[in-house]
Image (spheres, helix red, strand yellow):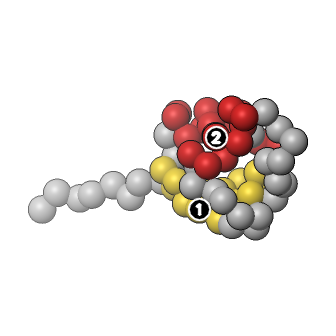
Amino acid sequence: MAEQKQAKTIRIKLVRSPIGYTESQKRTVIALGLSKLNQIVEKPDNPAVRGMINTVSHMLEISE
């Protein structure tokens, strides 16, 4: 039997409202699956998601 690797995930929490920020930052927050304050989502740990997190890091709280 082949052993499956556990995919790493990142827990992302929206702690600041995207109101007052640029449209592209608002879209990035939505693309991460966040729509409400203090909402937490789990996303795979890959370069695409890391780039989106880096773009709006001032609005997020990250835990692994």
Q: Residue at x 56, y 45 (%)?
A: 31
Q: Residue at x 55, y 40 (%)?
A: 49
Is 4 or 56 nearer to us in this picture? 56
| Quarter of the picture holding the N terminus | bottom left
Q: Residue at x 66, y 47 (%)?
A: 29
| Quarter of the picture holding the C terminus | bottom right
Q: Secondary structure at mark 2?
A: helix
Q: Amino acid at mark 1?
A: Val
Residue 63 at least partly seen: no
Q: Position of residue 26 (x, y in %)?
A: 71, 42
Q: Amino acid at mark 2?
A: Arg
Residue 44 at least partly seen: yes
Is 10 or 14 nearer to us in this picture? 14
Q: Give the label on residue 27, or none.
A: 2
Q: Position of residue 34 (x, y in %)?
A: 64, 57
Q: State the residue lying farthest toward the right.
A: 20
Residue 10 in the image: above or below residue 51 = below
Within-10-Å neighbours for mark 1: few <14, some 14–19, many 20+? some
Q: Secondary structure at mark 1?
A: strand
Residue 38 in the image: above or below residue 30 = below
Q: State the residue lying farthest toward the left.
A: 1
Q: Position of residue 60 (x, y in %)?
A: 76, 51
Within-10-Å neighbours for mark 2: few <14, some 14–19, many 20+? few
Q: Residue at x 52, y 46 (%)?
A: 45
Q: Quadrant of residue 3?
A: bottom left
15 displayed left or right of 53: right
In terms of sequence position, does the residue under pointer 2 or pointer 1 come before the other? 2
Tell which tag, 2 or 1, sits nearer the viewer.
2
Q: Quadrant of residue 63?
A: bottom right
Q: Give the label on residue 41, or none.
A: 1
User: Is mark 2 in CB contact (under 8 Å) with mark 1?
Assistant: no
